[in-house]
Image (cartoon, rainbow, N blue to C red):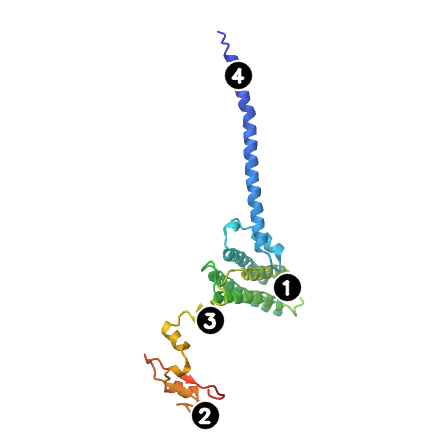
Amino acid sequence: MYNPLSRRKQPLPMLIFHVTPIFLLLLSSLTTAKATTTTTLHVHVANSTCEGTLYPHLCVSTLSSFPDLTSKTLPQTICSLINHTIQEVTLSSSNCTALRRRLPALTTLDRRALDDCLALFDGALAELKTTIADLSKAPTIGSQRYHHSQTLLSAAMTNLYTCLDGFAYSKGHVRDRIQKGLFRISHHVSNSLAMLKKVKKPSEKNEAFPEYGEVKEGFPSWVSPKDRKLLQSAVNETKFDLVVAKDGTGNFTTIGEALAAAPNSSTTRQICDIHKSRGIL
């Protein structure tokens, strides 16, 4: 039986057929735009972080390979770069081990140089891992940890160049086989050092003497209020237990004598006045 309404329903599948590709195209465009924005932000963060480094192209290309770069703090980014460097040091160490095994005709000098390199790589790895441990403790680092990390990275770089120096008088081509990788590693370490300088640190007035820890109101924070008051009081208002004076006007003429006279394991504080003079030590 003929149904006149059946002719109205036939175009619907055709309509769906035309709408679906348009929807997919829009969805694909949105996804592509989002990915492009993410990539652009990723590269922007890498470029910003690498400003001031000696090897910016290497820095940007390496940092851009970190998938979660945009969510990292600067210390975390440095740790990621150092982790990447550790992998390359490990690879260079394996390469040196393989060279030592595959090249039986190595000269004594080359063999010793390779052995030295392996030991130096171990030292560099330990220094890099310790740096990561230091930087992972807090978003900001104190002056003491900052200088410690700086020293460790510098030492790691020195180890790499010392490895190459071992081949200075070699007539073989062992150095040529490893130096490209070591230069790349040293450039990573150099970039890490440059980035470390940008890590937020306490102001100098709060930590003027790193070895004493945080400084508060001119004194290390561990100095008690009572001791602060004592140290800030005028000399003529202080009662001294010991007086050191070279001219004999005090109890002792040398600091050593005064220290020897102080009681051992005493719970009572001994206050010593040292008159300015030469030769009282």
Q: Residue at x 60, y 56 (%)?
A: 51
Identify the residue under disc 2. 247
Identify the residue under disc 4. 10
| Label whose residue precedes the other's in the sequence (3 or 2) | 3
Q: Residues within 10 Å of mark 3 (few under 14, many from 20)?
A: few
Q: Nearer the viewer, mark 3 or mark 2?
A: 2
Identify which amino acid the numbered label 1 is placed on: Arg
Secondary element type, mark 2:
loop
| Label whose residue precedes the other's in the sequence (4 or 2) | 4
Marks 1 and 2, how far apart at CA: 66 Å
Residue 103 location (% of width, % of height)? 61, 62
Secondary element type, mark 4:
loop
Q: Nearer the viewer, mark 1 or mark 2?
A: 2
> Do residues under tags 1 and 3 come within 8 Å of each other at their CB atoms?
no
Residue 31 location (% of width, % of height)? 54, 38
Marks 3 and 2, how far apart at CA: 35 Å
Q: Taking 2 as reference, is 100 above or below it?
A: below
Q: Nearer the viewer, mark 1 or mark 3?
A: 3
Residue 57 location (% of width, % of height)? 62, 54
Residue 204 location (% of width, % of height)? 50, 67
Identify which amino acid the numbered label 3 is placed on: Glu
Q: Residue at x 36, y 74 (%)?
A: 226
Identify the residue under disc 3. 211
| Label whose residue precedes the other's in the sequence (4 or 3) | 4
Marks 4 and 2, how far apart at CA: 120 Å
Marks 1 and 3, how far apart at CA: 41 Å
Identify which amino acid the numbered label 4 is placed on: Gln
